[in-house]
Amino acid sequence: MVPTHPDGHGGLGFLGLTSAAFAPIAFSATAVIAATWRQDILHHGAHLINFKLPAIVLVALTALVALGPLAFFIPRLAGVRRKGILDYGILGQLHSVEFHQKWILHRAGHEPEFLTAAENSTLADYGQVYEIIEGMNSFPADNGALYTLAAAVVIPALPAILAKIPFAVVLSDLLKALR
């Protein structure tokens, strides 16, 4: 693992896609469970609030099964990030001191060379590399895969929800939640 990897996860960003592979299973399980909830709502007088705790448990279990294995990488990635900040911080300090001495303390008579000096670009590029390390995420989850997993739980539950709440209300509330 390398702290400067552009995926922001030390090179393990591809592991975040694994949660999307669980989406069909989550969709199927939620469809079966939500169908029984809809049946209870339509034929036995149940209310949506009766399914609040089971819905929370369903979401939590789905997240645990789909994302739990990624938690094993958190300590290692956190260590790579910490070490990267230290190692690259030392290198950045050396480079910054050299730049400061050359272009701030001893610039007299060299001002015209400053605009074409390679050190300007190098210092800026190094700053970007350091920002990548600082922004490194210790949990290798992919946002797109998380959205896929969330949709796999929400979409099959919609018929149960729509049994009590009009579609327009559900849609407007979903759009508000996404903003």
Image (tube, rainbow, N blue to C red):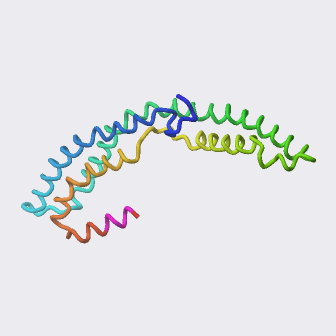
In the foreground, 93 or 139: 93
Answer left or right for 101 relative to 145: right
Name above or below for residue 106 compared with residue 43: above
In the foreground, 144 or 122: 122
Q: Residue furthest right?
A: 108
Which residue corresponds to the image point at 55% horizontal and 30% vertical from the top-left?
A: 2
Secondary structure that dominates the magenta span: helix
Which residue corresponds to the image point at 57% horizontal and 33% vertical from the top-left?
A: 3
Answer left or right for 78 relative to 89: left
Residue 47 image offset from top left, x and y in percent: 18, 63
Residue 44 image offset from top left, x and y in percent: 8, 60
In the foreground, 152 or 38: 152
Quadrant showing the C terminus? bottom left
Which residue corresponds to the image point at 62% horizontal and 44% vertical from the top-left?
A: 131
Q: Residue furthest left?
A: 43
- Find out whether residue 177 is within the magenta segment: yes
Answer left or right for 131 relative to 138: right
Q: Which residues are magenta?
A: 173-178
Which residue corresponds to the image point at 58% horizontal and 35% vertical from the top-left?
A: 4
In the foreground, 18 or 106: 106
Query: How many dots with numbers?
Result: 0
Name above or below for residue 161 compared with residue 123: below
Residue 138 image offset from top left, x and y in percent: 50, 38
The quarter of the picture where residue 94 lies is top right
- Find out whether residue 47 is within the magenta segment: no
The quarter of the picture where residue 52 lies is bottom left
Residue 51 image offset from top left, x and y in percent: 22, 56
